Image (cartoon, helix red, strand yellow):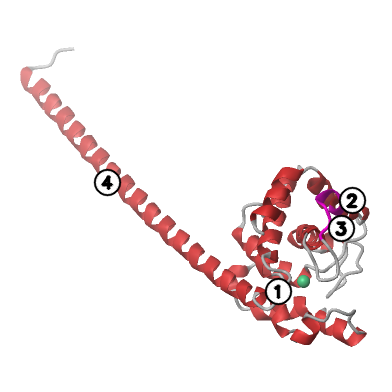
Amino acid sequence: MHHNTSEIAALQERLASVERSAAEKERQLERYAADLRETFKKERARRDELRRSYMATVRALCNAVEARDAYTGKHAERVAAYGMEIARVLEAPFADDPEVEFGFLLHDVGKVAVPDAILWKPEPLTPEERALMERHPLVGWEILREIDFLGEAKLVVRHHHERWDGGGYPDGLRGDDIPLAARVFAVADVLDALTTVRPYRPPSPLADARAMIDDACGTHFDPDVIAAFRAIPAAPLDEIRVGMD
Ligand SMILES: [Fe+2]
């Protein structure tokens, strides 16, 4: 094949022009990528800020409840920490879902509707008083109902006193019908109740509390959740209890 000089020059010119436009395209792509990275960073910062303000809202609500109850103190924060620890070991789908943690923190928000005389009554409650007290999961659910970002948290609030055997309240749900997050929460709640001081009894040592929770496996508690709970060593649980005293 024979090319004359002008054909070669034309080919070289075309090649150079293709290379120039390829380089231009590459620069353009790099600019797009930089823009995307910038947008992504901004979105993430916005999301973090939103999360912080959600968290502040949830804490404010939570403090409003706890401020009334001298005995429980940091109960909600400890229970949330125990609950998330169990969720991690259980590899629950919500193990790093802030929504569910909000539900753990807010579980007793409905107690704002329980009169002081009942909330703080040292003697056993009458059936009428107990009925009023046992409305708190439904009242809490009603309070939070319109808050979209709480999603699954609302289910924890509504169902945190259900029992695996169906003997709980308010809906008497049984087994898997109880949302998993509420089943996890139930164990965390009882663990904290047993290991902290009450006006009528001293706190139980962790080992005793564990034995009592074990005894309620399959009646009060989901056996799978109990299996996960058993797998947690004492150290992280002690750390949560002592760390938030
Ligand atoms: Fe409760």
Circles 2 and 4: CB atoms closer than 8 Å: no
Name the residue carrying label 3: 221
- Mark 2 and mark 1 lie on one chain; the one further toward the N terminus is 1
**Front-lying residue, 12 or 171:** 171
Name which residue lies at 88% across and 80% down.
123
Distance CA(mark 2)–CA(mark 1)? 27 Å
Is residue 66 at least partly visible in the picture?
Answer: yes
Helix, strand, or loop for circle 1?
loop
| Residue at the extreme top of the image, as rendered | 1
Residue 220 versus residue 25 in the image, above or below = below
Q: Quick check: is 153 in the magenta stretch?
A: no
Q: Is residue 175 left or right of residue 192?
A: right
Dot 2, how many residues are within 10 Å of its Cα: few (below 14), some (14-19), or many (20+)? few
User: What kind of element bears circle 2?
Assistant: helix
Which of discs 2 and 1 lies nearer the camera? The answer is 1
Q: Which residue is mark 1?
A: 70
Q: Which residues are magenta?
A: 203-209
**Image spot of residue 115 (x, y percent):** 75, 87
- Looking at the image, tell me whether mark 4 or mark 1 is earlier in sequence order: 4
Mark positioned earlier in the residue sequence (2 or 4): 4
Q: Which residue is mark 4?
A: 31
Q: State the image coordinates of residue 186 (x, y, percent, origin top left).
A: 80, 62
Residue position marked by numbered label 2 in the rendering: 211
Disc 4 marks which amino acid? Arg
Q: Residue 87 in the image: state x and y as whole percent.
A: 71, 51
